[in-house]
Amino acid sequence: MTTINGKACVANGTPVDKVFSDGRQVYSRNLLADSGFESGNVPANYTWGVPDTSIRTVKVMPATGTFPTPFGNYMLKIDNYSSDSSTIPDQYVQYQLAEPVVIKAGEAWTYSYYYVSAGAATGQASDYLLFADKSPLFPLSMGHDLRETSGGQTTWHRFVKTWTADRDVTVTALRFGFIRKSTNGTGWVCIDNIKLEQYPTATPWTPAPEDVM
């Protein structure tokens, strides 16, 4: 087994799905490419949930003084800077995965990511894994639960959800956003270190092997 950059594991040029140490699993392969946004590129093929893009942005950004510090060099930031009370309250962006992820019935999977939110975005989340028809996979999603906001707008929190699949599904896209908790408030969400792994608990974040090979 070869360790690349101390992060992702391959054997003879093939990604390793799991690594054990003293009988305990310590590594699961991340199925999501560029899930720490370390390419510095905004995810391809993204769309907003509502058509007016003049009052909202999605960007990949480095550390700044007033936002959380990314775990690597970059993080995803989604914001709405309109104070117009008539703006649709559900603000979100969704983007296609580079490769769909196939989940088979009976398999245990875990989805996790880190987030920080501020302003009107500190209310209900709007985060999902999506199928090809853009419908949500609720068992592995935050859905419309309330975000954890303790520590303020520079403190990361990790969302974790585990599911034993009761059917075959294919994940094709990710969605992140929020439902504005006040009709005339601006807000933003930062996302970093997303991981989708075939394991019944969350292991420490690692990049997809394809990101470092």
Image (spheres, grey):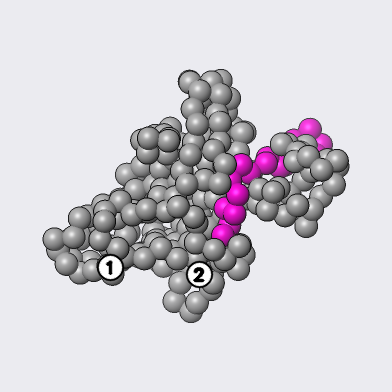
What residue does disc 1 label? 54
Prevailing secondary structure of the magenta residues:
loop
For marks 1 and 2 on the same chain, the one whose residue lies earlier in the sequence: 1
Q: Residue at x 78, y 57 (%)?
A: 5
Marker count (numbered): 2
Q: In the image, what residue occupies the spot 32% across and 44% down?
A: 144
Q: Which residue is mark 2?
A: 61
Query: In the image, residue 78 lies at what x, y percent?
Result: 39, 62
The residue positioned farthest toward the bottom in the image shown: 65
Residue placed at 57% from the left, 53% from the top?
35
| Residue 26 falls within the magenta-colored stretch | yes
**What is the x, y in percent for residue 189?**
39, 61
Element marked by disc 1? loop
Above or below, comparing residue 166 to residue 69 in the picture = above
Label 2 amino acid?
Met
- How crowded pointer 2 is (Cα within 10 Å; few <14, some 14-19, many 20+) is rated as some
Q: Quadrant of the N terminus?
A: top right
- In this view, 58 is above or below 31: below
In the image, farthest residue toward the front = 45
Q: Is residue 110 visible?
A: no
| Residue 187 position within the rendered picture, expressed as x and y whole percent measured from the top left | 31, 65
State the residue at coordinates (53%, 20%).
105
Nearer mark to the viewer, of 1 and 2: 1
Quadrant in which residue 118 is drawn: bottom left
The residue closer to the viewer here, 181 or 60, is 60
